[in-house]
Amino acid sequence: MTTIAKQYDTLDNAALTRLAAQALATCPQVIAPQIALFCRSENATFQVTDARQRRYALRIHRPDYHQQPEIQSELLWLDALRDAGIEVPAAHTNRDGQQVIPLRTDTGDTRYAVLFDWIAGEVLQSDLSRVAREDFIELGRTTARLHQHSRGWRRPANFRRLRWDHATMTGPDGHWGDWRAAPGLRTADMPLVEETLHQVSAAMQAFGQGPDRFGLIHADLRLTNLMRHQQQTRVIDFDDCGFGWYLHDLAAAVSFVEHHPDAPAWVAGWLEGYQQHCPLTPAEVAIIPSMLIQRRIQLLAWVGSHADTEQARSLGPHWAQESLRLCRRYLDQRGLPVGAE
């Protein structure tokens, strides 16, 4: 049986700050650091400024999600992407030559940290009221470049990352938990989701996992993880990267907002940009509805395992019911399962 990963950190800010100081004590290149908690989502990220006014991002990993070899594998892909001219974060080594820095919590548990160069720039778009089709065209283009690299890159033999397939996304022992635990879902609603998953499973099995369709992906490449600096697009937050269907990155692009009235235009923009570099086959176009609804149900699992977080609460009381509406749209084959009624 798959071990369900812990989804977010239960340490308080003071404990996380002590871990950050512990990590930086092993990095002599960071002189007299000033530490400020930048954000807490899945992991904790600190902004670090040293005496030379050089900035860094220090990521403290939550427990029981990635082990040290998996984090190191993420960094190997980042190195390869930078070598290919794609702007992504660069990790530093500490005095022991480690990029993945082991830490000890106050209770004696082992945790890991990574010190990155600070990525300058502005998030491409975070305000839904200002999102334009052009933003998603750029997101699609950037995603295609990652996929081109993934298809051609010879990974090291010891490369290890999570696998994002139908079972690990939507099964009861999935990486993000069980969708049945989502707030707002009633027992009477579950047969609709189960029927949707039955059809999605059949579609995914028929589509297959050939190397042209399934490989190393970002798995969370949304506008919030794309930055612009001096006309240059930069990609951040590879924490969920792993092995999945390439078109899952399209579904991830509209995460949490599949029900938005403008979502069909966003999907169309992404496809326009993506196909400038990676034209899709008819079979790939046909599988897109299943990819989209599979991701939405995966997010039901995420909301269930993150119900106490600010992001989950911000979705509002009707998010689960909107998910059910999209399931009905998928089963009725009324176009893509995105958008309003």
Image (cartoon, rainbow, N blue to C red):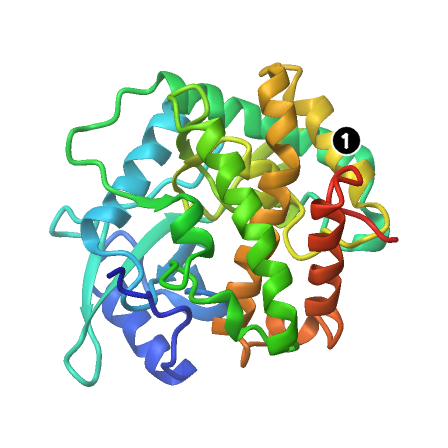
* Left or right, residue 83 beside residue 203: left
Q: Nearer the viewer, residue 3 or 238?
A: 3
Q: Is residue 153 above or below residue 269?
A: above
Whether residue 214 is visible to the viewer of this picture, yes or no, is yes
- Callout 1: few (<14), some (14-19), or many (20+) C-alpha neighbours within 10 Å? some
* Left or right, residue 124 beside residue 291: right
Q: Residue 89 at what x, y percent from top left?
A: 43, 41
* Left or right, residue 107 beside residue 154: left
Q: Is residue 76 above or below residue 275?
A: below
Which three-letter amino acid code belongs to the residue tagged 1?
Ala
Q: Is residue 188 above or below residue 47?
A: below
Q: Nearer the viewer, residue 244 or 15?
A: 244
* Left or right, residue 246 beside residue 3: right
Q: Nearer the viewer, residue 197 or 49?
A: 197
Q: Which residue is mark 1?
A: 268
Q: Is residue 241 above or below residue 18?
A: above
Q: On the image, which quarter does residue 156 sit in?
A: top left
User: Considering the image in quadrants, where does the N terminus appear?
Assistant: bottom left
Q: Nearer the viewer, residue 252 or 209?
A: 209
Q: Residue 217 at what x, y percent from top left?
A: 44, 35
Q: How many marks?
A: 1
Question: What residue is shown at x 21% (from left), y 57% (from top)?
Answer: 101
Q: Residue 158 at what x, y percent from top left?
A: 15, 35
Q: Residue 141 at what x, y percent from top left?
A: 63, 25
Whether residue 229 is visible to the viewer of this picture, yes or no, is no
Question: What residue is shown at x 55% (from left), y 59% (from top)?
Answer: 194
Task: Report helix, strand or loop for mark 1.
Answer: helix
Outermost residue on the left side: it is 96
